[in-house]
Image (cartoon, rainbow, N blue to C red):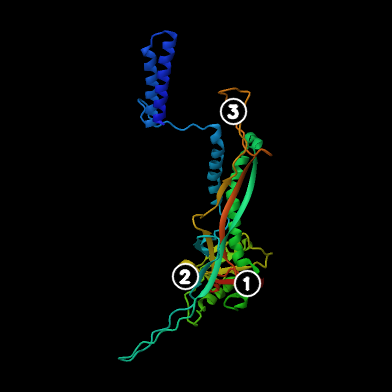
Amino acid sequence: MRVIMKTLLDIRETTYKHDCQRAGQPVDARVLETYKASYKAIDSNLAGFVEGRAEGRMQEAMTTGDFPFAIGEFVNRLLVPGYEQRNFNFEPLVWNDTLTNYLPHDRYQKRSQLDDLEYTPPGGTARVTAQSDATKRQYQVHDFKKALDFNTQALVNDDLGYFEDTALDMGRSARRTLEKFVSRMYTNATTIARLQGLGVLFSQTGRMTSERISEARMGFNQRVDDKAEPIHANMAFIVYHRGDKDKVFQIQNSQLVPETDLNGVNKALSVPFIAIEDPYITGAAPNLPWYAFTNWATDNIRPFVLARMQGRPGPFVLRKKENKEVVASVLGSGGTAPILLGNMLQGNLEFEVHDVWGTFIDGVEGSLFDNRGAYYSSGTTV
């Protein structure tokens, strides 16, 4: 830019001298000094040095052509806060994986431990341990999108923050869709049927009480691997319908059994659990289902997996390039052209919110990546 400005100064000085020669007038040195002083001021701004001022480098000015990009930046900056507004804190429940493309990816799940050591007499040879094959799991990611149109006139007339609210809603919509996706990992019929088919250590029908939460914990404590060896599967999370919010609070804050007048100890507190409210669980009170899960970070048992595309950890916004451009105006040369955005047909600004994720889906297991880390109750028995 500084080279361009110097070239323009040289051209201007040459033109001024040529005009003076044609008019038969002498070259005024004061005019040349004015040109040079103007160049020096602009050059200092570009270089970041302005005498007597602290503003520093000259800043970029927005033009009509920059406005669409400013709109895109505005949407992006509001989408992120909207995406961070959470109704369902599912993150502790799912193990995260990253895939490189849209093709199915294979993962192999170890289902048992090595055999115990054996006594070997002096000079004896250790026997080779028997190790069961790993279970193959396969999942992939998919696109989730939604397109939105903004009318240009509505944007210009907006004095109530509608555009700002809508940009925030883009982020909220992306987050809400992902939350519902995670909720369906364990509320779908196939996953539930699988847990029910595994028996009393994996499911029951009782409504949530301190005693039944204790039964769920005992179910986790009795889990074994494929070689019938005990595994470390501790109940860490209770996921509940929002209709049980007060009941969960009572269970977690009562030293005695909260459901009766007896002075029994509240066994649900023997090992504290974290309660997570899932607003997307369906049910009619008092028959409200509830779930229990292990903590994959501590037990290395991954009940569910949430896969994302490499380089796309969250949603992003696309804007369709406008095909409308000012080519003539009654304002004449040098007049400020009005801001005209959108397409030629409706004059709308077109955006798209795009996210990529996926999970394990199986005809038998449902979305249970590892069924040893989950527990289900239908909440239908008193």
Judging depth in this view, the residue of 94 and 336 nearest the camera is 336
Could you say which disc has been placed on residue 268 in the image?
none
Judging depth in this view, the residue of 252 and 234 nearest the camera is 234
- Secondary structure of the residue carrying tag 2 is loop
For the point 53% across and 73% down, the residue is 136
Mark 3 / mark 2, whichever is N-terminal? 2
- Secondary structure of the residue carrying tag 1 is loop
Give the CA distance from mark 2 to mark 1: 24 Å
Mark 2 / mark 1, whichever is N-terminal? 2
Horizontal side of residue 294 vs 260, given as left or right: left
Q: Which residue is mark 3?
A: 337
**Amino acid type of the residue that numbered disc 1 sits on in the rendered structure:** Gly
Horizontal side of residue 377 vs 21, given as left or right: right
Mark 1 neighbour density, 10 Å: few (under 14) some (14–19) many (20 or more): few
**Residue 226 position within the rendered picture, expressed as x and y whole percent measured from the top left:** 51, 80
Question: Could you tell me if residue 253 is visible in this image?
Answer: no
**Amino acid type of the residue that numbered disc 3 sits on in the rendered structure:** Ala
Q: Which residue is mark 1?
A: 363
For the residues carrying marks 1 and 3, which lies nearer the camera in this image?
3
Image quadrant holding the N terminus, namely top left
Q: Are marks 1 and 3 in contact (CB under 8 Å)?
A: no
Could you say which disc has been placed on residue 300 in the image?
2
- Secondary structure of the residue carrying tag 3 is loop
